Amino acid sequence: MTQQATSADAPPTDGLAVSGARQGAGGPTAWTITVLTMIGFLGSVDRQVFTTLLVPIQKDLRVNDTAMGLLTGSAFALVYAFIALPLARLSDRANRRNILAAAVVIWSAATAFCGIATGYFTLLAARFGVASAEAALMPTTMSMIGDLAPPARRGAPVGIWNAGIALGFASGAVIAGVLSDHYGWHAAMMIVGLPGLVVGALMFLTVREPVRGAYDGPEGQTEREPLIASLRRIARIQTFRPFVLGYVGLNISYQGFLLWLPPFLMRVHHLSATQMGLIFGPITVGGMVSTLAGAALSDRLARRSPKWRLYFAGGMAAVAAPLLCAYALAPGLPAAIALLLAFTLVGGSISSVSQVSYLSMAPVHMRGLVTAIMNVIGIALGGGLSGVVYGAVNDALKPIWGDQSLRYTMQIAPATMALCAVMYFIASRTMNRDVARVTEGEKIAGDSA
């Protein structure tokens, strides 16, 4: 497997691929990753602002936790899931730069529109707009990154992109808290939506579309096969079966953690929106540090063989689970903050390493589709479940424990994180073979595995 990884790192030799390899080695790739990171940053700011403002929005709308869970999680996820596959299919066949540039403009405008919403259903409609456009973010981004670096070196650009995501969550919490305390949540939503209009134009005007498959083996004209045939090819990738279960567990844990941490800090530890943002921000920066360090380390491990990425991700999930359990039960704020920081330093890299792992198994002309499937199954399903399930469980526990009920509701996160660890270790057993199919140009159809 070491020889396979080395050969995959070598630049392509045919004319079209050499063009892509040259782009992958120089300034255009660095700029492309920079702009992609900026867009990821804005997407996470938009999401985190809404999550941070959950308490004042809920008070203004006068709805319960289940309704807010629907607004922040399940409704968003359902729309996301409905449109993700068509957009992913389009990204595998059309210009990804143009798709992403249009998407960031649309979701930014929809975020700003949230600020002028006057009721629950108008706000829900605006969130539908955000979800529809953000469904293009991951398929286009992961597909482009897959063509900017060889398999054993994709951890670094994916890590940089995820660091931008983490920084966006941190910045969004601080920005939303300050703006909400001074100007109200309506103004906060309108202000954070505006920068995306500029960055969308920057993407369209300055970024070049990468050459597809520049660092991977030949795969024929699979990009033109029917959707059902493509889904069958993906279903025959053996590693995906346990990996998907682990990814769902990871996202139920992550999404529930990110969605309910601000209310946890405000209800259990009685912080204001500004205080919560000032704590939540630095904690999330720990995730950014973990993402960069973990992605780089996973690249080094992947030089031994691809399965070491899943060894790493599974190991970090196993360590992260008890930390998630402990922070929610910590009696005082200082101990909770220390445990939260420890969790982000350990668990922040799992998502980016997971993304590189499924990207390495995805056929070249199906990277957008595979990414969308992982998002629908993992993020949409995981996020959707975390929104309603956490909210419903907390509504059930609140008559007994009051605001302290979130301590026990948050125990869902370590349980699903432990599931992720187990499934990733199982998936690692077939990882090398499935990655070799892509790097060596082997066909999946007809394989007994």
Image (cartoon, helix red, strand yellow):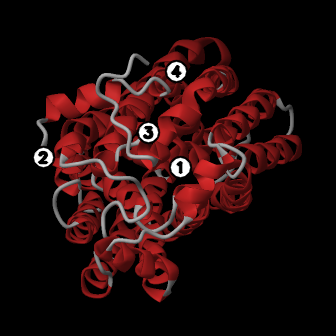
Residue at the (56%, 58%) spot, across then down: 7
Q: Is residue 60 left or right of residue 104?
A: right
Q: Which element type, helix, strand or loop, lies under badge 3?
A: helix
Q: Amino acid at mark 3?
A: Arg
Classed neighbour count for the residue bearing mark 3: other residues with Cα under 10 Å, few (<14), some (14–19), many (≥20): many
Residue at the (43%, 53%) spot, across then down: 50
Q: Are marks 2 and 3 in contact (CB under 8 Å)?
A: no
Which residue is the site of mark 1? 356
- The Cα–Cα distance between marks 2 and 1, rounded to whole angstroms, is 24 Å
- The Cα–Cα distance between marks 3 and 1, rounded to whole angstroms, is 16 Å
Which residue is the site of mark 2? 224
- Label 2 vs 1, first from the N-terminus: 2
Image spot of residue 304 (x, y percent) = 72, 47
- Label 2 vs 3, first from the N-terminus: 2
The disc at residue 437 is 3
Q: Marks 2 and 3: which is nearer the front?
A: 3
Q: Marks 3 and 1: which is nearer the front?
A: 3
Q: Amino acid at mark 4?
A: Pro
Among the 4 quarters of the image, the one containing residue 164: bottom right
- Label 4 vs 3, first from the N-terminus: 4
Q: Which element type, helix, strand or loop, lies under badge 1?
A: helix
